[in-house]
Amino acid sequence: MNKPKIVILGAGYGGIITSKKLEKLLKSGEADVTLINKHEYHYITTQLHKTGAGTAADRQIAMEIPELINEQKTNFIKGSVTSVDVKKQAVYLEDGESVEYDYLLIALGFDIETFGIPGIKEHAFAIRSFRSTKAIYNQITRQLTQYKEDKDPSRLTFVVAGGGFTGVEMLGELAEGLPKLCKKYDVPYEEVKIVTVEAAPSVIPFFPKESIQYTTEVLEKFNINMYMSTKILECTPDKVVLENNIEIPTRTLIWSCGVKGNPIVQNCGLPVEKGKLPVDPYLRVKDTNNIFSIGDCSLFMKDEKNALPPTAQVALQEADVCAKNIVAALRGETLKAFEYHHKGSVASIGNFAAVGKVGNFRLSGLFAAFMKQVIEARYLLNLGGPSLIIKQHFGVSKEPVKVTANQ
Ligand SMILES: Cc1cc2nc3c(=O)[nH]c(=O)nc-3n(C[C@H](O)[C@H](O)[C@H](O)COP(=O)(O)OP(=O)(O)OC[C@H]3O[C@@H](n4cnc5c(N)ncnc54)[C@H](O)[C@@H]3O)c2cc1C
């Protein structure tokens, strides 16, 4: 008898953890599992700002997928998914290959929301993937090099659009990383300007006012220029145009103003709402019984009006239930409804400060920075056990990661 085929699209937080859970849950020979990802590495999305600022080695952020999975139990295909044919139960890849499935998990993550602002798509640098944040780092070092030739101050102005969690993490990392880079490239750090632009009245506007105040003070200490309650109107190769006739000459706009579901979900012949795949309480895509979706590309309504946010925390909790439900579905057992338990969130502002909330406790300062490290370490533990934590912290190779796919 043919074994059921389980195919997982995307080896980000949701996809790779589901595949690892399936390795444990499935009996030997019970199903064939295939994991498809556009890169041969899995990257720690929540640490991408470090790649952008050059404050972490490539191998701390991006890890080879075959080293993370059990290749006897999970077949890994490096390939870029272009569409899904639900009737034929097949997934199509950019190179023309197709992969058949009986059970499918779509965990293709997010894409950047540009809100149609002119020039963002063409000229801004997005915090989106390992590759896109390597592009930020390369842009920074290129500007430092060229500044030495033409002394154009716009080369030393780095603008971060969006003062949410990701924007604040990027600012903190730039403030810590740029002095070292300036030293390396022999450029005076005093000439560097780091700027943030946020449409809301403050950074991390959804946080309690004490956290906002703390974050603002840390950013001020870092000499970051803050434009709050200000919208970006346009980005060109050498300036950013803001409301109120403000123009900032810069070659580097780092875009961190929101995400949407991966647009590939539109090519799956499945219902799409708000650019994402709506799922039922069992994480199955609406109107299907063999297609699941989790993470940033799925839409899970926690009540009538509100969907769960696109966070790693949601993707990881969903992965746990999704793996169990895929196994239950193929065994003809009852599926488990997903319930989300918010454990808190912490944003780093460089290495020595952070801000957030864990349970009922509001955190800030060095202790919060420590908690952030604990959260990241817990993920590595989940992903590859204690040996991965040790390897990532102490034995990481300095060899750069080769970036091959398009984004
Ligand atoms: C800088 C930053 C900091 C963040 N900090 C936090 C935080 O502190 N806490 C938190 O909870 N969340 C945080 N988030 C959000 C969190 O990272 C996402 O919610 C999480 O990564 C979603 O997981 P996912 O599995 O849905 O998608 P992803 O982790 O994005 O994985 C999607 C995978 O699909 C692959 N893929 C995409 N398209 C294709 C294709 N066509 N074919 C094949 N493969 C494809 C990608 O390469 C990727 O491996 C942060 C995000 C960023 C960018």
Image (cartoon, helix red, strand yellow):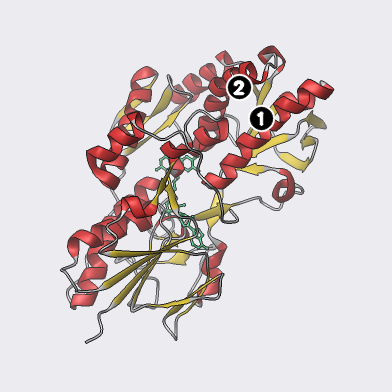
Query: Spatial distance from mark 1 to mark 2, Cα to Cα?
Result: 8 Å
> Camera-side residue: 197 or 61?
61
Mark 2 highlights which residue? 181
Amino acid type shown at disc 1: Thr
- Label 1: how many Cα within 10 Å (few below 14, some 14–19, many 20+): some
Label located before the other in sequence (1 or 2): 1
The x and y percentages for residue 155 are 75, 27
Badge 2 element: helix
Q: Which residue is mark 1?
A: 141
Give the x, y percent position of residue 110: 51, 54
Q: Does 394 sit above or below residue 282? A: above
**Left/right of residue 385 with respect to residue 184 in the rendered view:** left
Q: Quadrant of residue 124?
A: top right
Q: Is 186 left or right of 34, judged from the image as shown?
A: right
Q: With respect to residue 140, does 338 lie above or below? A: below
Q: Label 2 amino acid?
A: Leu
Residue 195 visible to an observer of this rendering: yes
